[in-house]
């Protein structure tokens, strides 16, 4: 059975997605301004935490624009055509930007906050997953489900982000509340992302019917927006203190 959205559902999804994009763009502009002000005041360009988040948001913004084209124009949420060209190419590009953003952010966080204790391994693993997804040949829906499953591994690896900020929140400091907000925000965003990984949806559709896709897409967007709101608050607090 082919899954199709009604006009109302399509418009609601589009509005929620555009809200998500607007939050990302707003955070990019805010962080870019803070980075510029810091450089102007100190005469130095810092590749620190705020810069890492800045790069992450740019990557997620580009990724979401590509996914909008993939979801709302190319496929209209019909999973039966995900594996076809140029659909699969757009999906791979969107996934590449998203995962690379996390890889860069985790690498910078490792260097600047953890003292490179992780030796960049988490970032390298994410890059490896991206390469596999890019080169893996996809010609059937089953092939698509295989590479989509790798997103679960990417998100599992990226769990280092909330763990790190929960650890930072243990100590009393001006960054405690901001760290908690970032940690919870990332967790909510990750849950929202994992909810619509294709193999999970396929398994649930077999049990609950095709309408479960609609429910999961809706709650995925709600969780992503909520997570990004918390993440934005936390990063904003870091950026404000960073710019002083």
Image (spheres, rainbow, N blue to C red):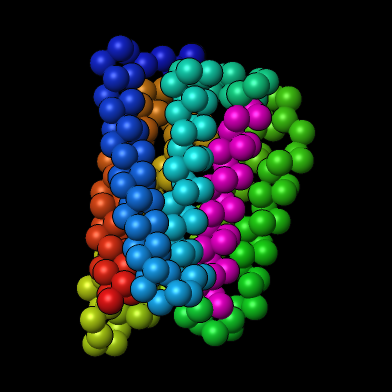
Question: What residue is rendered at 63% in x and 37% in y?
Answer: 92
Q: Is residue 117 above or below residue 226?
A: below
Residue 99 visible from this viewpoint: yes
- Could you tell whether 1 is left or right of 107 in the image? left
| Residue 22: x %, y % from top left | 31, 39
Q: Is residue 219 above or below residue 233?
A: above
Question: What residue is rendered at 49% in x and 56% in y?
Answer: 55
| Residue 70: x %, y % from top left | 52, 26
Residue extent of the magenta highlight: 88-111
Which is more toward the observer, 168 or 101?
101
| Residue 193: x %, y % from top left | 43, 45
Which is more toward the observer, 13 or 110?
110
Inspect the magenta stretch and tell me whether residue 104 lies in it. yes
- Could you tell whether 191 is left or right of 120 in the image? left
Question: What residue is rendered at 36% in x and 44% in y?
Answer: 25
Q: The C terminus is located in which quarter? A: bottom left
Q: Magenta: predominant secondary structure element?
A: helix
Q: Is residue 72 above or below residue 220?
A: above
Which is more toward the observer, 31 or 4?
31
- Could you tell whether 229 is left or right of 143 in the image? left
């Amino acid at each position: 059975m082919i899954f199709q959205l009604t006009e109302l559902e399509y418009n609601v999804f589009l509005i929620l997605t555009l809200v998500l994009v607007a939050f990302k763009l707003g955070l990019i502009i805010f962080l870019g301004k803070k980075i510029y002000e810091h450089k102007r005041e100190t005469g130095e360009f810092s590749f620190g935490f705020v810069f890492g988040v800045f790069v992450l948001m740019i990557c997620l913004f580009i990724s979401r624009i590509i996914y909008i084209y993939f979801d709302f124009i190319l496929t209209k949420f019909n999973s039966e055509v995900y594996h076809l060209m140029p659909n699969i190419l757009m999906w791979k590009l969107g996934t590449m930007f998203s995962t690379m953003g996390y890889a860069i952010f985790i690498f910078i966080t490792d260097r600047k906050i953890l003292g490179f204790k992780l030796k960049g391994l988490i970032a390298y693993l994410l890059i490896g997953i991206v390469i596999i997804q890019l080169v893996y040949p996809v010609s059937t829906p089953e092939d698509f489900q295989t590479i989509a499953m790798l997103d679960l591994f990417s998100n599992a690896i990226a769990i280092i982000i909330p763990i790190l900020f929960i650890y930072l929140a243990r100590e009393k400091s001006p960054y405690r509340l901001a760290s908690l907000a970032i940690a919870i925000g990332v967790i909510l965003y990750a849950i929202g992302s994992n909810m619509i990984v294709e193999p999970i949806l396929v398994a649930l559709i077999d049990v609950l019917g095709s309408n479960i896709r609609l429910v999961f897409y809706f709650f995925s967007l709600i969780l992503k927006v909520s997570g990004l709101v918390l993440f934005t608050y936390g990063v904003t607090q870091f950026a404000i203190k960073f710019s002083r």
